[in-house]
Amino acid sequence: MDKACTHEPQQLPKCLTGIQGLDEVTNGGLPKGRTALVCGSAGCGKTLLAMQFLVNGATIYDEPGVFMSFEENEKELEENVASLGIDLKELVAEKKISLDYVYFDKNEISETGEYDLDGLFVRLEYAIKTTGAKRVVLDTIEALFSGLSNESIVRAELRRLFRWLKDRGVTAIVTGEKGAGTFTRHGIEEYVSDCVILLDNLVHDQISTRRMRIIKYRGSSHGTNEYPFLIDEDGICIMPITSVGLTALAPTERISTGVERLDIMLGGKGYYNGSSILISGTAGTGKSTLAAYAADAACRRGERCLYFAFEESDHQIIRNMKSVGLDLKQWQEQGLLRFVASRPTLLGLEMHLVRMYKLVNEFKPRLVILDPISNLTASGETGEVKIMLTRLLDFLKLQGITAIFTNLSSPNQTETTELQTSSLIDTWIALRDIEMNGERNRGLYILKSRGMAHSNQIREFILSDQGIDLVDVYTGTEGILTGSARFDQEGKDAAQRLLVQQEIERKQREVDRKRAKMEAEIASLQLAFDADEEELKKLIAEEAAQLGALAKAQKDIAALRKGDK
Amino acid sequence: MSEDEMLDKETTEPEVWLLRLYIAGQTPKSVRAIANLRKICETHLENRCQIEVVDLMEHPEIGRTDQILAIPTLVRRLPEPITKIIGDLSNTERVLVGLDIIQIGGVDGNDATDPIRK
């Protein structure tokens, strides 16, 4: 037994399982040198968990192990884990793992008198010795109960076995089938007091979710929640999704939305890096397109983008985006853009979350798109979806990953998203259709954008093969007009302007004309005056001459009369 | 069991009974089992049997190859098919039934030998 670890009373020595997430939930693994019970109903992954514990021990932690199986033979075990890329045969050949299939059939054995299970002990001891095992798995040891009819002997021997395993200092996992009302069918949890892990397969609305819970872990703190887990090509993956709290940093760096005009609306610079963005809108308002533009912009910057599509396949998205001038295929080929398309009903919410965590950890994107989140309600209640999204956002924010959600909103409630997610969102862009004059146009506005000055204007959102264009909507006496009505109104306005222009010109001309007339009249008057003046001057001269002549005649007459004057 | 039946058996089955008893150290149970087995051989098989005692403490690897779980385990290797009896063989009648030396009848019928044996 590893006595070295007992010197540290503060910390219970632990044995890393190497199973993703399990070591975090258990704060460092299973209790070292003790026996843990993994129980659960059929097909919930007990054997796999135990096997991964052994294989990881042998390959990562240099701790060989013994797998004693009471259900499957060596060949079956090898085949079962081969799909996880584990070559059990090689590990056995290298003496890192010893497989021992304990076969017994009640029908072939008759019992008479007292016996014990020393045969099992001898085999275990031999296997531990030859491999130098530090880890032991007894897979469904309860099979002993069905194989041997003397239950009291089996119970006594099991008690002895667990004691014996402890004395050997090996870290052991025993698995047990879940019974009615008890963790195991034959109540062996009463012998295994150190650590009990329950695996479970919950089916809700026809969707199954695998879950794990640590029921007890003596001498250690541990996560108490039910943790969803995944079995995929890497084996078991547990995601300890706890609320991480509001500790995320707030980057000030800005990233482009992919639409120049939208960047301008968002304080001229676009989204905050690492923020959460909601694009909501009614059907067909271009939510996905806007999200795809952001994806394109991210890839253009050389950043990776993970696109979870819940409605369309990747081919469909690529084709559709091509029609608005986006070539997403190039990014996909360059490995910058990864699509994960699945129906929401494929998995339960928790599993979606787990899968997202896993993919985000794997792919390490800078931008994550969920298109659309409203579809997730297909696999869970609205409240559950909100909790899930909160957890996802917390997780993404903590890593500084920008998240874009699209949400299909009902026409009457544009500003209250169905999922009540608005409070989680930093930047909320609303798209709405504006129906008027027998046509439907798209409008875009920013409902909120934390931490930046943003435009309060509604812009008309035009999709064409040239891409997205945002134009000012017509705002005037007629109210807000878009589309052809806007076009029409703008035409009317132009005509109006022309009319006024012409009126001004006409009046100008009239002034000119009047002036000309006046000037002409002035000229003719002048002319008449000049003529009169001449005439009168002539008359004046004549009359003056006449006056002189008269005076001279007077004088002459006086002279003639010889007057005394 | 009548004399005729015994004769019948003897004509169809080989002369020698090969019995192997697995023990793990000289525990009281093992010692008892050995003694019981020898007694049964003498009285019921008239020493037509070969008894082989395997101590797993000395040959631990055999436990796995021969699929031994309980101790003591008695294996009838011949005549075929192979049958296993676990326990200290204190109940002679059950041992005889288990070894197929006597047919069922009179003895408790629960230990019926299974005709569909491997």
Image (cartoon, coloured by chain):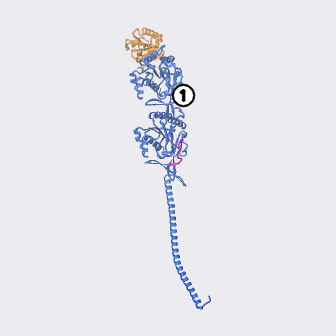
For disc 1, the chain is A
User: Which residue is identified by label 1?
Assistant: A224
Closest to the observer, A60 or A155: A60
Name the quarter where the C terminus of chain B is drawn: top left
Callout 1 secondary element? loop
Q: Nearer the viewer, residue A210 or A561?
A: A561
Please say whether residue A476 is visible from this viewpoint.
Answer: yes
Q: Quadrant for residue A295, please give it.
A: top left
Percent coordinates x, y for residue A233 in the rendering = 43, 31
State the image coordinates of residue A206 (x, y, percent, origin top left). Answer: 50, 34
Q: Which residues are magenta?
A: A449-459
**Residue A149's x, y, as percent?**
49, 18
Decide: is B61 above or below A502.
above
Shown colour of chain A: blue
A232, A393: nearer the viewer: A393
Q: Main secondary structure of the magenta part?
A: loop
Q: Quadrant of residue A314?
A: top left
- Farthest residue to the right: give it: A564
Which chain corresponds to the colour orange? B
The correct choice, above or below, for A440 with respect to A2 in the image is below
Q: Is residue A187 above or below residue A487?
A: above
Name the image quarter holding the N terminus of chain B: top left
Q: Position of residue A379 (x, y in %)?
A: 51, 37
Residue sitting farthest toward the bottom: A561
Number of callouts: 1
Q: Residues within 10 Å of mark 1 (few under 14, many from 20)?
A: some
Magenta segment includes A363:
no
- Nearest the camera: B110 or A81? A81
State yes or no: residue A457 in magenta: yes
